[in-house]
Amino acid sequence: MIKNKKYLSVLFALLLSLTIQHAFAQSATDTKILSPKQKGIVLMAALTAKGDLTKLKPGIGSALDAGLTINECKEVFLHAYAYCGFPRSIQGLNTLMATLDERKAKGIKDQQGKEATPILNDTNKYETGWMNLAKLGGRPTDGPIEKPTSGYGAFSPEIDTFLKEHLFADLFSRDVLTFAERELTTISVLIALGKGVEPMLGSHLGLTLKQGVTKAQIEEVFSLIEKSISKSDAEAARKVFAESLSRN
């Protein structure tokens, strides 16, 4: 009996220790902060959407100083165009080029970084885009590929095709940025665009969480945008986020 009590006592202590370790690990995950590179992505994307080139130039400099490569910066602007359009994206690229020239003149050597891996012989881009979207949403990728039967995708099959074949196939298949970094780019652009894009912002906030970005990190995105760009945009995004969480 004494041996059994001793065994149970040791087992209880072990289970308690494991529970405490898990709680600390979970707490650390929940409070994980954005890395300097992620902050650079957020600010570049949001400032590009706003068209604030005056703030964008030092923002690009900070992102490069934080370790983003030239190609990663280029990719942020390339990805952003899908959400805020060619005019803003091209101005972002022009600002990047000007910033790089100024830094080079000062003797700063920025790293070019890796190029996107070529995507060869993709004969069914719709399927590729569908699978990338399924991965983003944490859904199985081995099910039947069906086109929308309701909503805007059914009303305008063309835009559904553009979304799947270009946005989710062409852009999300490029490996310069991770899915998480692309979603940080996306939500930052949408937050900066302000009113009128709330449904898409809510959807992408959910997708951002599925990429391993924590609630605390998303809250930090709001804080960065509030401090550097717009308090009203950040507050509106917080409301969308709260509503999105309440539905899940």
Image (tube, rainbow, N blue to C red):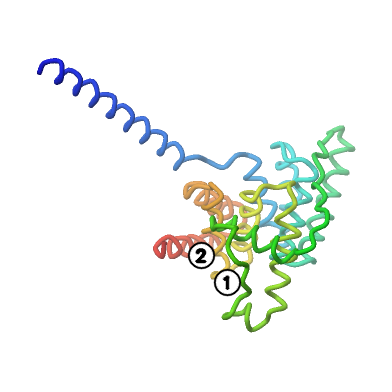
Q: Which mark is residue 57?
A: none
Instruction: Describe the element under mark 2 as helix, strand or loop.
Output: helix
What amino acid does circle 1 point to?
Answer: Lys
- Which of 12/204 is in front? 12
Whether residue 49 can be seen here: no
Cβ atoms under marks 1 and 2 closer than 8 Å:
yes
Locate the C terminus and report the quarter of the image it occupies: bottom left
Q: CA distance from mark 1 to mark 2?
A: 8 Å
Callout 1 crowding tier (Cα within 10 Å): few <14, some 14–19, many ≥20: few
Residue 192 in picture, x, y percent from top left: 62, 62
Instruction: Describe the element under mark 1 as helix, strand or loop.
Output: loop
Callout 2 crowding tier (Cα within 10 Å): few <14, some 14–19, many ≥20: some
Whether residue 196 can be seen here: yes
Locate the N terminus and report the quarter of the image it occupies: top left
Give the quadrant of residue 130. bottom right
Residue pictured at 56% horizontal, 64% vertical: 201
Give the quadrant of residue 190. bottom right
Residue pictured at 80% horizontal, 39% vertical: 113
How many numbered circles are shown?
A: 2
Residue 51 in picture, x, y percent from top left: 73, 62
Left or right, 100 with reference to 206: right
Residue pictured at 42% horizontal, 34% vertical: 25
Residue 125 in picture, x, y percent from top left: 75, 64
Q: Earlier in the sequence, mark 1 or mark 2?
A: 1
Residue pictured at 14% horizontal, 20% vertical: 5
What amino acid does circle 2 point to?
Answer: Ala
Residue 244 in picture, x, y percent from top left: 46, 63
Left or right, 29 with reference to 45: left
Give the quadrant of residue 243. bottom left
Q: Which residue is mark 1?
A: 195
Tell which residue pokes out farthest to the left in this image: 1
Q: Which residue is mark 2?
A: 236
